[in-house]
Image: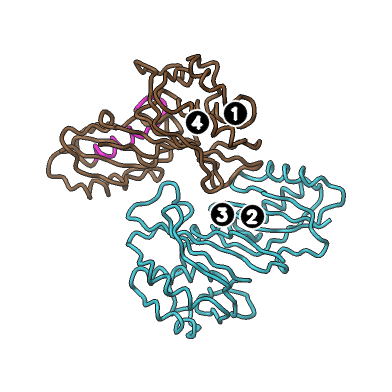
Chain colours: A brown, B cyan
Amino acid sequence: MNVRLTLEYDGTDYRGWQIQPGGPTIQGILEEALAVLLKQPARILGSGRTDAGVHARGQVANFACPDGRDLTRIQRGLNALTPDDMTIRAVEAASPSFDARRDARRRVYEYRLWNHPWRSVFNDRYSWHVRRPLRVDAMREALAALEGEHDFSCFRAAGCGAATAVRRIYHNELFLWEDHWVYRVEATGYLRHMVRNIVGTLVQIGLGERDAGGLPALIDSRDRTQAGPTAPARGLFLVEVCYE
Amino acid sequence: MNVRLTLEYDGTDYRGWQIQPGGPTIQGILEEALAVLLKQPARILGSGRTDAGVHARGQVANFACPDGRDLTRIQRGLNALTPDDMTIRAVEAASPSFDARRDARRRVYEYRLWNHPWRSVFNDRYSWHVRRPLRVDAMREALAALEGEHDFSCFRAAGCGAATAVRRIYHNELFLWEDHWVYRVEATGYLRHMVRNIVGTLVQIGLGERDAGGLPALIDSRDRTQAGPTAPARGLFLVEVCYE
């Protein structure tokens, strides 16, 4: 039986989604818990990797489950066996062909900016604290140039293993939510650190260090060194993964 | 010079506002930091005590400051010397007679309920997790009976030192915010654990264990044993203190 998981996690204390040496990963913790429940080794496939320190509100994954298992009990067991910074929101039977990564049609990320002279006690773990006032109008001006299909090499981190740097951003916006500015972006897929590099560049525009009108030329340059710095991981959330 | 502080804190790791033995308190941490900055013992008076584990987004306090001190530097110094779960949002000169406790005209508290079968990773520290579905309509029905001037002995914790149990609730409501139910209440002052005892009683109503129509009789009883349990501290926030 093919089973689909939906989960949220606070990525602060993890080395990211994907199993790797040097510290706990979301995938590693989940597979360990699942192996205990299934009494056999387990492999969980995520819709995509989130980097170290990045959070998720709606990560999706799937795994092969022996037939006849009670999925409500598996959900309860996973929530009991995993730490408090992780919650499995849903465990559902999926079609045999469902693949959380390959079948994902759209991935939605949000990045939170805390733009205030003083740190926020309640949001510090989940936002980038930018002290100087941001000119949000200028940042918004830049958004249109990002939509559509482009070669996003200028926002691609070193070590990105993708075959091509062409991606399509369906929609991106910047809105106020609970005293935060939130950058929200929807695309089929992303290059390594792409969202954080876009945010780092938008913040430069907001601080008056870069011109909003220069974004098309920046994209055309395909040159990572021309774009802004990588925004910290703490502000980034994988919000939703959409399937057909 | 009389100085007014506005601050927020995550109360999880504190024994409450007021200095007492057995663990760190907000007042204690603030007074220690202020004494370092002023190079003399300091006394800070809060608008009211918050209990152990209760949070604040807009606590107000005042203290006597030697004349001629730069208040921006004091704010920066306090934020540097206090832990990350506390932020001083404002440091302002106040009139000589200003008293954060005596002059407070209205105190606003909010209580967050996470009503979902599964724990919330991002909100667990700041809400009471109620797993069974709440009938919010029934809870709202009960709110009208709480408004106005009443003897609130039925919601008064043992050890409350107030001279009288009569308080006036100006307004209370229950609204949805970011997937949470939030109980918001405005009154001049409160008895010990009053808001948490009200919430514990409202949740009983929401779970169908108590009738919304029974609230006037409960208040009339003046009997703490007739009301519901004390809701956990983690969900409670002192949101705002209003002055003339």
Residue type of the residue flagged with mark 4: Leu
Which mark's residue is nearer the viewer, 2 or 4? 4
The residue at 58%/80% (across/down) is B149
Task: Tell me how far mark 3 sits from mark 1, CA to CA.
Answer: 37 Å
Q: Give the range drawn in magenta.
A: A19-36
Instruction: Say what secondary structure mark 4 lies in.
Output: helix
Chain designation of label 3? B
Do labels 4 and 1 touch, CB within 8 Å?
no
Q: Is residue B56 left or right of residue A243?
A: right
Residue type of the residue flagged with mark 1: Ile
Of label 4 and label 1, which has the lower sequence position?
4
Quickly name the residue at label 2: B26
Up the image or down, A76 lies above or below A202; here it is below
Quickly name the residue at label 3: B11
Which mark's residue is nearer the viewer, 1 or 2? 1
Residue type of the residue flagged with mark 3: Gly
Of label 3 and label 2, which has the lower sequence position?
3
The residue at 65%/64% (across/down) is B48
Chain designation of label 1? A
Task: Tell me how far mark 4 sits from mark 1, CA to CA.
Answer: 11 Å
Which circle marks residue A143 in the picture?
4
The residue at 30%/42% (across/down) is A6
Quickly name the residue at label 1: A205
Do labels 2 and 4 touch, CB within 8 Å?
no
